Image (cartoon, rainbow, N blue to C red):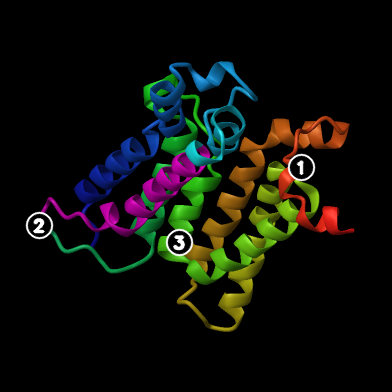
């Protein structure tokens, strides 16, 4: 039996944790500016690298990953009602999804946050690490060949449900129908948050990081 009180509390707390505007806080501390007024204007990890450099960028991404992991792995286990909660995947998925929504639509910054990649990574790390490895490999391959973070993120988003379907068919990593549905929803959501990037990619106007194009330099 699932306590609805527990679920509501878990979702609210997960959303608030996800809502912590890491890049805005770090940029304010380090440079005394609002990151939303510089670079792409996005309060996420990629713009943090552009505006503040790689050290601050890594810090922002690491904290954003931790937000998703903490929600899915720990907050989802809270039990304030005393009613036993079934040990399934639904509650952790709801907690992780709430954290991602909080990151993208943070209540602390007029509901304008990042695009959800880092926080989603934390959720997948907690719940589906094998599928995450596949997505991460796809992300790295595209990033080091193209330099486009957005294209790499979209590729990883496509790779995730494919990996989940494969694991489901192989009966691995305890993948069920709920997890499969979630994989398609999170992939679609990533495409939604990257809709402006998709337009720029099609128009050939998307910015990229030339320094990470390892394969391109070798060729």
Prevalent SS, magenta region: helix
Expressed as whole percent of the image width and height from the top left, the position of residue 55 reads 50, 40
Q: Secondary structure at mark 2?
A: loop
**Is residue 210 depicted above or below 125 in this figure?**
above
Q: Secondary structure at mark 3?
A: helix
SS assignment at label 1: helix
Q: Residue at x 56, y 50 (%)?
A: 186
Q: Is residue 187 above or below residue 103?
A: below
Of labels 2 and 1, the one closer to you: 1
Q: Is residue 94 left or right of residue 41?
A: left
The answer to the question of whether label 2 and label 1 lie on touching residues, with beta carbons closer than 8 A, is no
Q: Quadrant of residue 18?
A: top left
Location of mark 2 (residue): 82
Q: Which stretch appears magenta?
A: 57-81
Q: Is residue 19 magenta?
A: no
In the image, is 17 to the left or to the right of 40?
left
Of the residues under marks 2 and 3, which one precedes in the sequence?
2
**Quadrant location of the N terminus in the rendered image:** bottom left
**Cα gap from disc 3 to disc 1, whole angstroms:** 28 Å
Residue occupied by mark 1: 210
Q: Circle 3 is placed at which residue position?
A: 125
Going 36% across and 50% down the picture, which residue do you hit?
A: 95
Q: Where, quadrant-wise, is the C terminus in this rendering?
A: bottom right
Is the residue marked by circle 1 packed among few (<14), some (14-19), or many (20+) residues within 10 Å? Answer: some
Q: Is residue 35 above or below residue 14?
A: above
Drawn side of residue 198 relative to residue 14, left or right: right
Query: In this orientation, which residue lies closer to the viewer: 88 or 162?
Result: 162
Circle 3: is it few (<14), some (14-19), or many (20+) Cα within 10 Å? many
Q: Is residue 208 above or below residue 128?
A: above
């Amino acid at each position: 039996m699932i306590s609805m009180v527990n679920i509501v509390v878990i979702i609210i707390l997960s959303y608030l944790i996800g809502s912590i505007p890491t890049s805005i806080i770090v940029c304010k501390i380090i440079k005394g500016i609002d990151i939303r007024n510089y670079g792409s204007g996005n309060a996420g990890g990629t713009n943090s690298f552009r505006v503040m450099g790689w050290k601050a960028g890594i810090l922002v991404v690491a904290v954003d990953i931790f937000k998703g992991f903490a929600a899915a792995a720990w907050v989802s286990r809270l039990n304030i009602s005393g009613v036993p909660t079934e040990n399934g995947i639904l509650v952790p998925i709801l907690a992780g999804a709430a954290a991602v929504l909080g990151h993208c639509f943070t209540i602390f910054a007029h509901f304008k946050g990042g695009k959800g990649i880092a926080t989603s990574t934390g959720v997948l790390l907690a719940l589906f690490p094998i599928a995450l490895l596949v997505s991460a490999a796809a992300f790295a391959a595209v990033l080091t060949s193209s330099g486009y973070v957005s294209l790499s993120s979209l590729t990883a988003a496509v790779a995730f449900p494919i990996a989940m379907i494969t694991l489901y068919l192989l009966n691995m990593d305890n993948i069920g129908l709920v997890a499969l549905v979630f994989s398609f929803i999170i992939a679609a959501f990533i495409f939604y948050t990257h809709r402006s990037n998709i337009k720029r990619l099609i128009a050939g106007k998307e910015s990229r990081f030339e320094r990470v194009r390892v394969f391109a330099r070798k060729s």
